Image (spheres, helix red, strand yellow):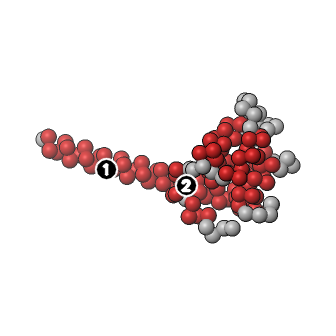
Amino acid sequence: MGRNLKKWAIRISVVLFVALFVMFSMASLMIGLGVRGFSSAAERQFPGDRAGALISMVGCESCILRDRNHAVWALGQLAEARALDVLEKYYTGKPCDHEHFICQYELEKALALVRSGRNPSSFLWRWMLFEQS
């Protein structure tokens, strides 16, 4: 009976590990698709490379806030060092006012990723970006 229980515990552990890995991988791939989509939209509107277009989108006062927020998120996911100045420019640390200003929470998260210079999960989706500029 003890051996059976041990075998089942090992099987359940393996299944849980595989399930968690698959969920993590799928979430990371969805992040990659989001970064790719938002950066493509920014590149259609602003000249330059992916990061430059996203930086321009964040700084575009005439662009809708939703697009600017998406650009902030994408820059954070890319951990793009060139974005530090524009992200700091719009970060006030005040409560979010989504009607009038870029989301402070997203800016805070993006700044943390940019300042660290890395996004640990990006290895799972960075390959998606190679076909673009």
What residue sits 64% from the left and 47% below the top? 114
Residue 57 coordinates in the image, percent (x, y): 78, 53
Q: Nearer the viewer, mark 1 or mark 2?
A: 2
- CA–CA distance in space, label 1 to label 2: 25 Å
**120 horizontally vs 36: left or right:** left
Question: Up-down: is 122 above or below 96?
Answer: below
Instruction: Work out which residue is located at the far right of the displayed protein and give it.
Output: 62
Name the residue nearer the viewer: 32 or 121: 121
Residue 106 visible in the current orientation: no
* Residue nearest the observer in this picture, 34 or 8: 34
Q: Determine which of the numbered discs, if any, sits on residue 14 in the image.
A: 1
Q: Residue at x 16, y 45 (%)?
A: 4
Visible in this render: residue 99? yes
Q: Is residue 131 left or right of residue 28?
A: right
Q: Which residue is at the far left?
A: 1
| Residue 34 falls in image quadrant | bottom right
Seen at 64% across and 56% down, the residue is: 35
Q: Earlier in the sequence, mark 1 or mark 2?
A: 1
| SS assignment at label 2 | helix
Please rate how many residues cluster around mark 1, counting C-alpha atoms within 10 Å: few if below 14, some from 14 to 19, many from 20. few
Residue 6 appears at what percent x and percent y?
20, 43
Q: Residues within 10 Å of mark 2 (few under 14, many from 20)?
A: some
Q: Residue at x 71, y 61 (%)?
A: 50
| Residue 56 image point, x, y percent | 79, 54
What number is the disc on residue 117?
none
**Which image quarter holds the C terminus?**
bottom right
Give the residue type at disc 1.
Val
Quadrant showing the N terminus: top left
Q: Which residue is mark 2?
A: 122
Image coordinates for residue 130, horizontal then vertical, percent: 61, 67
